[in-house]
Image (cartoon, rainbow, N blue to C red):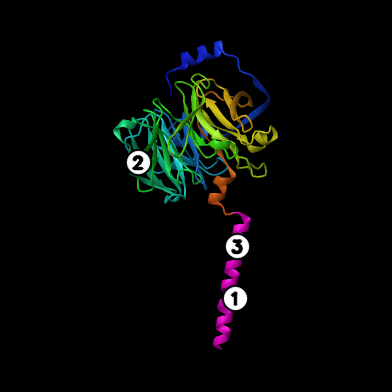
Amino acid sequence: MSRHCVWAAAFFAATSISVRADNIDFSTFVSSSSIGAVEGGNHSTIAFNYAGNKFVGSVYLGVNNNQLYSTNLAGDNVALFGSPIPGAGGEVVIGASLGKGGFALGDIYTGSEANGQIYHYANTGGSPSLFTTLPAAAGVVRQIFFDPGSTFGGNMLVTTTSGNVYKVTSSGIPSLLTGVGEDTEGMDIAPGDWGPYAGDLMVGSEGSGTLRLISPTGSVTVVESVGSFPGAETVSAIPLNLKATNPLEGFYVANYPNDIQFASASQFIRQGLLGDVIVTDEFGGNTAWDVHFNATTNTFSSTLFNFTGNSIQQFEDGIFVTPERISVFTPEPASLRLLLLGGIMAGLGILLHAKLRV
């Protein structure tokens, strides 16, 4: 939660930004009553992440602040996930490992604004174990993200209140990627059509409203300067190969203090937004930006979305479930065919060997 609401309101009073003609329509994915039923009445949603066979979320302050919950892939069967997180408090963030860089597939890692500790859960839940403690210079944990490709070696990436951004190996060893000098939270990887920035890490700082790109070597490029994205919270890339045929693909976001909201992939496809980036505003209710990179002019532009449907009271952590994320957990049909063919060939080899021995 930020303390710059007055500043953000002043910015909007003095600034005019064009609004898209098309709308993004949100619908409720997990209801407040379902979350509250397992979290002791607390449905103040803060984080929500996709772990392949489930979603895992957290709630803010109050009862069960350090207790995660899970849902199935339809947003149903809400249940407590694992034991409470030792020492956690305030905003509790969640990352789900992608089976790269030595990390297991679909495990849950969590930290909070209470300290620099990150805890690890198996995909099935159970008791958490301390995975790593960030250096004192980090401040506290603001976000946990796993590199879905190879740009950052498949490692865990962590943003912090100090503005330090860390890479963390599967052995729990953190190393400083870079420092941006201010509280930094949301992050994702820049799309493949972003020219020289493709594969860079994008990070947002809600206090100043600045969006930055960080290269694998730690060099920093400012996408939009101070004040461009007041309350910058979630940063999510819209994948170039997004498909409307898979109902799981789309944008999921914690709508504080109520529920989890979802916007389907078809809406972003219809409006030609593939390869753009969503930056949400923690303070502005239905406020979020579409950030576009023009590869011809090597420039960035941003326009406001116009959201309809269920009202977003306050954007918190969110995630775009992409074809890449899904394929990590579910082999593509071609891969399945290869596995099946391999099994058949192995079976034929056994039969042939048996006949030769007769």
Quadrant where the image shows the N terminus: top left
Does 121 sit left or right of 196 as displayed?
A: left
Q: Quadrant of residue 191?
A: top right
Residue 111 locus on image (x, y percent):
38, 36
At label 2, the amino acid type is Pro
Residue matched to label 1: 348
Q: Is residue 128 magenta?
A: no
Residue matched to label 2: 174
Task: Check residue 261 in the rendering and tell me which mark sits there, or answer none.
Answer: none
Predominant SS of the magenta segment: helix
Separation of disc 1 and disc 2 at Cα? 49 Å
Q: Please tell me which residue is depicted at 44% across the width and 32% down the height of the picture.
A: 59
At label 1, the amino acid type is Leu
- Answer with mark 1 or mark 2, whichever residue precedes in sequence: 2
Outermost residue on the front side: it is: 297
The answer to whether marks 3 and 2 mark residues whose Cβ atoms lie closer than 8 Å is: no
Q: Quadrant of residue 248?
A: top right
At label 3, the amino acid type is Leu
The part of the chain drawn in magenta is: 332-358
Separation of disc 3 and disc 1 at Cα? 15 Å
